[in-house]
Amino acid sequence: MGKIITVCNQKGGTGKTTTAINLSTYLALAGKKVLLIDLDPQANATSGIGVNKHNIQKSTYHILLEELEPQEVIQATAISNLWIAPSNLDLTGAEVELVGALGRENRLKRALAKERANFDFIIIDSPPSLGLLTINALCCADSVLVPVQCEYYALEGLTQLNNTVKLVQDNLNPALTIEGVLLTMADYRTNLTKEVIQEARNFFKEKVFTTVIPRNIRLTEAPSFGKPIALYDKESLGAKKYEELSKEILGVSLSANVLPAKGEA
């Protein structure tokens, strides 16, 4: 059975979609069969992996509305072993249309029940909110990965997210765990970045990934070309860090040359 990881943070601009795309890519490059599910109406994961969101006729909207089976929506990407269930603006209406639906929180879970056996990992990119789409993503997940930007207000929103995860655990998905907290957009030239990293490690302890994603211009550029960083610039620091993250997820020991440099963690 494939492991389902939901990438989630109700705060925007934390590197959530960048993480979903590049983690999925490096897991696929490691030989794992991976399905990336775009559950955000903005469809940035869809376009960022190289699929034209304006040409999408079958999307995750149709899965949630139970109009199509996942296999009718899933399509291949330019990366071997990586498939995507794309999104488009139609998904905006899903929350409204599902308001009165019975078992609306478990629509995605039911849809993926048969697909789990076909993949090693299913990575879900959730929207920057704690609405019904995100609840669906959490209800079907085995774990949640939380990207946190290294900035002043970054840790404040985690209390609300933590409460939501606990509510889901208590009422809808008791098996849900925290995969880890991923520190993103780190700028080691500032004391603030070092303080946020230290505070996060003090609070979340071993739940904080060893890998820290730096601010990296190549990571910023890659989505505009519809490419994950592994295809856009595999030698960039951003690429190497997302490869490290995939190894942490897979439980591969990080060699000395890929561990954070002194002062980075």
Image (spheres, rainbow, N blue to C red):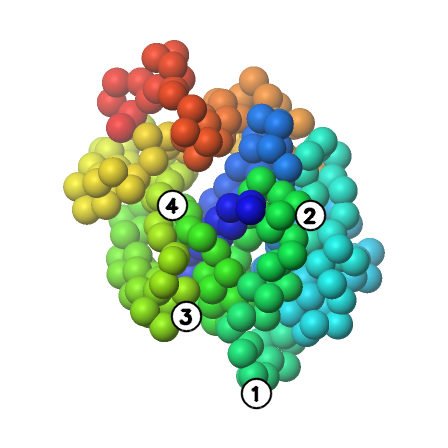
Badge number at residue 172: 3
Total labels: the figure holds 4
Crowdedness near tag 1: few (<14), some (14–19) or many (≥20) residues, C-alpha within 10 Å: few
Task: Residue type at mark 3: give it.
Answer: Leu
At 27% from the left edge and 57% from the top edge, which residue is drawn?
156
Left or right of residue 167, residue 121 in this image: right
User: Which residue is most to the top?
Assistant: 257
Left or right of residue 131, residue 82 in this image: right
Q: Quadrant of the C terminus?
A: top left
Circle 4 residue: 179
Circle 1 residue: 100
Task: Residue type at mark 2: give it.
Answer: Ile
At 37% from the left edge and 32% from the top edge, which residue is drawn?
212
Q: Which x, y percent locates residue 3?
A: 51, 46
| Whole-number angstrom distance, CA of label 2 to CA of label 3 | 26 Å
From the viewer's perspective, is residue 85 above or below residue 231? below
At 66% from the left edge and 27% from the top edge, which residue is drawn?
231
For residue 218, which quarter of the picture?
top right
